[in-house]
Image (spheres, rainbow, N blue to C red):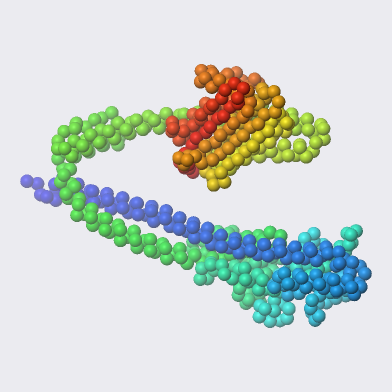
């Protein structure tokens, strides 16, 4: 009798245990790495959104200040007062200044100063240098050289580290009706106006945001020591020049956001404290679950090995042949009931694998053919020729606006057609693609063609095969509306059906046709100027679109068509509400 430790049962038990350890370790490592990446991605995205949200608030505030300064600079009373300098005008301007102050509690002072030093303000004691020629003042010269209001960095009204004494100035030129310089409007905004928008951002225990302008001057930082410490300021300048993104060594995220309407850049530095905590908790959970599973396997493996000892060798040999690629094999279904079932399932599995491999080979071959067809049909030379001919015709009549709009539509049409070489797109982009095509055709056919597009906004990000609507729209125009006497109407709709699927409906009130003829002769709807050897229906064809959709989604989905002579045509596309594999 062989020793137990040399028996097949013992060896199978330990092999099973070792394989389980390897699988658990590999699976746990992959899951840990994957979940960690997801958590990190969500943490990074969350912090970026928080920084972007603060930046958006600051942009909105800047825009509001620009509106106020523009309103004051272009106010007729302001212009007349700077030209005439009468007391009645001064009172009117001061009233406008008071209304500006009431509209925003963070505005410290509003100053209207003429080019000769003449000044109106809500404050009587201003620490401002004036002269009879204000062009000698750098800030004044900068304001009149800019077409937009000019923002400065944070500055102290008097030397103090108290942020309540700090202001940020916005200046804008005042011109008379003939465009000549009369003066400048200057708004002093309290530093707290920015601080209130940025103080509450959750960027971790050591995270912070700061604003720096194009002259590398510090505009905002919650730690005021950075304004007076040159070494700290240089550190911020260097960080603003670095590539943004997550640094795993420092566990720090740097995100930069140029603020629209200014030369400011918002830089957010986030310490992802929660990320390390989540990773540690995740690792502990994997270790505990893995240990429990391994203990269970260790206890169960001898029993499993004993039940597999005698008949499993034959099954193992069959599996080895399958691993080597020989699928033409069948295991005799003999033995106890459980082993008969195992052998029966093994035989079914081998048969299914063989069928799946054959189906996969057929699918890949068909997919390559369809991809090649899409590549050939992405640029329709006849459509391009007709569109360019239409543009030339417009140019000859010097219809510049229509030339520009049609050319832009053509450029966007082909850009969406190419899609960087991808076979897929979103519903929003597909609807944009067909809308650009119809816009061009509308320019060509004029009142002969009218169209309407609509789709459910909740479906904009659904991923679908591209160029499935334009062929149907082209078919409706060339074979329905163009052949009709009088104007025609084309409608394209996209919505979610009651069963959860997504459906597209392309309908026209053209001449229509007998659908039975399409089944018997798919090529009868060819364009007159197309190659007669190809079944061409809008560049790809109804059958091609239907075949592609069935290839991706199955035989339950695809294209259905209803039509009758003189009553128009309706084409429906039905696809499931799922993202394509790999998207």
Residue 177 in the image, given as x and y percentages of width and height: 89, 59
Q: Quadrant of residue 106?
A: bottom right
Viewer-proximal residue among 564 and 362: 564
**Total count of labels:** 0
Q: x%, y% of residue 481? A: 65, 26
On the picture, is 455 further left or further right than 161?
left
- Residue 436: x and y in percent read 66, 37
The image shows residue 223, relative to residue 538, as above or below, that is below
Q: Is residue 325 left or right of residue 548?
A: left
Question: Residue 45, relative to residue 189: is it above or below?
Answer: above
**At x 87% / y 65%, what residue is drawn?**
79
Furthest-left residue in this view: 1
Q: Residue at x 76, y 37 (%)?
A: 402
Indicate the position of residue 360 as horizontal and vertical percent values.
40, 32
Q: Is residue 184 visible?
A: yes
| Quadrant in the picture for residue 562 | top right
Residue at the spot 65% in from the left edge and 60% down from the top edge: 258
Q: In the image, 94: left or right of 220?
A: right
Q: Is residue 509 left or right of residue 203?
A: right
């Amino acid at each position: 009798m062989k020793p137990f430790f040399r028996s097949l049962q013992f060896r199978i038990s330990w092999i099973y245990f070792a394989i389980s350890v390897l699988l658990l370790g590999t699976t746990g490592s992959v899951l840990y790495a994957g979940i960690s990446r997801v958590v990190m991605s969500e943490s990074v995205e969350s912090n970026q959104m928080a920084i972007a949200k603060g930046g958006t608030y600051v942009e909105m505030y800047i825009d509001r200040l620009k509106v106020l300064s523009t309103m004051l600079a272009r106010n007729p009373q302001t212009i007349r007062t700077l030209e005439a300098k009468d007391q009645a005008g001064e009172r009117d301007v001061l009233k406008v200044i008071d209304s500006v102050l009431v509209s925003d509690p963070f505005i410290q002072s509003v100053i209207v100063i003429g080019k000769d030093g003449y000044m109106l303000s809500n404050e009587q004691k201003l620490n401002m240098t004036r002269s009879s020629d204000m062009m000698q003042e750098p800030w004044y010269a900068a304001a009149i050289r800019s077409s937009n209001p000019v923002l400065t960095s944070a500055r102290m009204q008097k030397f103090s580290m108290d942020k309540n004494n700090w202001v940020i100035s916005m200046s804008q030129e005042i011109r008379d009706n003939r465009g000549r310089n009369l003066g400048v409007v200057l708004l002093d905004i309290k530093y707290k106006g920015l601080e209130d928008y940025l103080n509450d951002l959750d960027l971790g225990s050591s995270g912070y945001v700061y604003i720096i302008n194009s002259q590398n001057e510090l505009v905002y930082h919650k730690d005021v020591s950075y304004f007076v410490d040159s070494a700290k300021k240089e550190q911020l300048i260097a960080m603003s020049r670095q590539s943004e993104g997550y640094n795993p060594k420092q566990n720090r995220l740097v995100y930069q956001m140029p603020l629209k309407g200014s030369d400011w850049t918002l830089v957010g530095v986030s310490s992802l404290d929660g990320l390390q905590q989540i990773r540690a908790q995740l690792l502990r959970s994997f270790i505990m679950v893995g240990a429990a599973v391994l203990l269970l396997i260790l206890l169960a493996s001898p029993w499993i090995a004993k039940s597999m000892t005698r008949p499993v060798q034959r099954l193992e040999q069959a599996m080895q042949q399958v691993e080597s690629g020989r699928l033409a094999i069948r295991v005799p279904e003999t033995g106890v009931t459980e082993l008969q079932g195992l052998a029966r399932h093994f035989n079914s599995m081998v048969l299914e694998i063989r069928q799946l491999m054959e189906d996969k080979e057929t699918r890949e071959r068909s997919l390559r053919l369809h991809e090649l067809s899409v590549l050939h049909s992405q640029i329709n030379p006849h459509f391009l020729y007709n569109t360019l001919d239409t543009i030339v015709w417009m140019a000859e009549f010097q219809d510049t606006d229509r030339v520009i709009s049609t050319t832009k539509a053509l450029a966007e049409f082909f850009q969406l057609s190419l899609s960087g070489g991808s076979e897929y797109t979103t519903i929003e982009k597909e609807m944009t693609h067909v809308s650009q095509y119809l816009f061009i055709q509308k320019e060509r056919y004029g009142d002969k063609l009218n169209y309407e597009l609509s789709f459910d906004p909740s479906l904009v990000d659904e991923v679908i095969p591209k160029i499935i609507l334009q062929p149907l729209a082209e078919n409706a125009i060339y074979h329905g509306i163009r052949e009709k006497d009088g104007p025609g109407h084309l409608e394209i709709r996209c919505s979610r059906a009651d069963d959860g699927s997504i459906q597209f409906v392309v309908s026209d009130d053209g001449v229509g046709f007998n659908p039975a003829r399409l089944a018997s002769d798919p090529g009868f709807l060819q364009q007159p100027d197309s190659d007669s050897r190809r079944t061409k229906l809008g560049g790809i064809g109804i059958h091609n679109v239907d075949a592609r959709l069935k290839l991706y989604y199955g035989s339950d989905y695809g294209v259905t068509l209803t039509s009758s002579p003189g009553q128009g045509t309706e084409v429906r596309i039905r696809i499931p509400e799922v993202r394509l594999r790999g998207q």
